[in-house]
Amino acid sequence: MVLRIRAEHDLSPMELSSLEERLHHDNRRMTDRDDDRGLAFVIRDGAGHAVGVAAGYSWAGTSELTLMWIAEAHRGRGYARQLLDAFVAEAADRGVRKIWVSSHDFQAPGLMKRLASSAWPNSRDGPKAIPISFFAER
């Protein structure tokens, strides 16, 4: 059998999900940890439309915030902080000790700087400081 590497930049969400599940299966087997779960909080308007989200996962005492978004019309009202607080509290309840976040430098820079400079949420019993990586300078 000849294996080839090829660029396939438009994999379907279904195929990506299937490949990711294979990775998770291997991780569970290698670490004997099967506590991986989605972790998401959503703010909805009266019509049920999502206007904000903090989503990611937890596994093996760690968590990653992979999606953070507030609709433009609802920004500047503290919703992002409320979503982050809920995300961190749930992660702490699951025994998470580290939460990973990465962002672009233009995405909520004020919020990200406050989080980084305060080593938030740095409580004794909850997850420790969130490492933040910034990508793509303008």
Image (tube, rainbow, N blue to C red):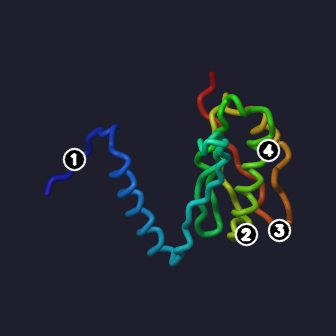
Q: Looking at the image, do the residues carrying marks 2 and 3 touch, with CB atoms under 8 Å apart?
A: no
**Looking at the image, is mark 2 or mark 1 earlier in the sequence?**
1
Q: Badge 2 local density, few (<14 within 10 Å), some, or many (20+)?
A: few
Residue matched to label 2: 93
Q: Amino acid at mark 1?
A: Arg
State the image quarter where residue 111 is shown. top right
Question: Between marks 3 and 4, how big is the CA–CA gap?
Answer: 18 Å
Question: Between marks 2 and 3, how big is the CA–CA gap?
Answer: 10 Å
Which of 61/66 is in front?
Answer: 66
Q: Secondary structure at mark 4?
A: helix
Q: Secondary structure at mark 2?
A: helix
Residue matched to label 1: 4
Q: Is residue 78 above or below residue 137?
A: below
Q: Secondary structure at mark 3?
A: loop
Q: Looking at the image, do the residues carrying marks 4 and 2 touch, with CB atoms under 8 Å apart?
A: no
Front: mark 2 or 1: 2
- Residue lying furthest front: 47
